[in-house]
Image (cartoon, grey):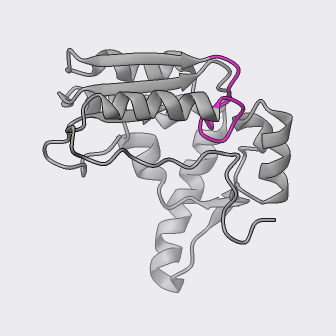
Amino acid sequence: MGTSAGKNPLCAAILAPPYQIRQSIKPGEREAYTLLAQIAKPLLKLTGRHIYIPYRVKPKDIYVSPEAIERARTQRLLLPQISVNNHRYMMEVQDNVIYAEKVQTPTLVMVAEKDALIAPAHSKQVYEALLSPDKKWLEMADSGHSLLGDRQAKKVTTELVTWLNSFLQQDAPAPVFATADLQLPGQG
């Protein structure tokens, strides 16, 4: 969730929103990130270079489907490292419940039952904070964090299109979504 969305959207859909990223940090990681971030800021000013840390999220953390895990590995869908320069925002500022408390737009919140990254209970806190009386909670069985790339991608896409279409004007074209089984140009 963020604050730069359009002023009056007809509706919204949020997939696996974290309440606070800091809820997912393991013991000791926060202190290590804080120390690195304190070094990174002046280093960036002096040299223009970021300090990176290994990205701890692996394909098995976001997918349950063996095919999706293999696709993520072979196509290198995950970054191998991330910059620590966003530390202050991620560890001290980011709080999607605060953002959700300002949302009056009809909103679909969809989470994965087997999400190993963002606990559905954390996403539920974001959902409960939404002010809109027209909100919907969907927990997808047999899917990991990457709802649109895992085994239930077609069902997720159907739910998203159905939700969005229920709020679009009749003469507006239906949204187009890519699913995991579509071939993109250059893929064989």
Instruction: Give coordinates of residue 126: x percent, y percent.
Output: 37, 23
Please provide the residue range marked out in magenta: 141-152
174, 52: nearer the viewer: 174
> Residue at (71%, 20%) from the top-left corner?
142
83, 69: nearer the viewer: 69
Would residue 108 appear left or right of 22 to someone viewing this image?
Answer: left
Give the residue at the far left of this rendering.
Answer: 8
> Relative to 184, does residue 166 appear above or below in the rendering?
above
Instruction: Give coordinates of residue 152: x percent, y percent.
Output: 66, 29
Instruction: Give coordinates of residue 146: x percent, y percent.
Output: 63, 38
Give the residue at the far front of this rendering.
Answer: 171
Give the quarter of the figure containing the C terminus. bottom right
> Residue at (20%, 30%) from the top-left corner?
105
Would residue 80 appear left or right of 42 to someone viewing this image?
Answer: right
Q: Is residue 107 visible?
A: yes
> Relative to 170, does residue 108 appear above or below in the rendering?
above
- Is most of the magenta stretch helix, strand or loop? loop
Q: Name the image quarter holding residue 62.
A: top right
Is 14 contained in the magenta span? no
> Residue at (61%, 45%) from the top-left corner?
179
Would residue 108 appear left or right of 5 to someone viewing this image?
Answer: right
Give the quarter of the figure containing the N terminus. top left
How many marks overall?
0
Q: Is residue 25 visible?
A: no
Is 145 contained in the magenta span? yes
Instruction: Give coordinates of residue 159: x percent, y percent.
Output: 47, 27
> Residue at (29%, 28%) from the top-left corner?
166
> Relative to 177, does residue 122 appear above or below in the rendering?
above
Q: Name the image quarter holding residue 66.
A: top right
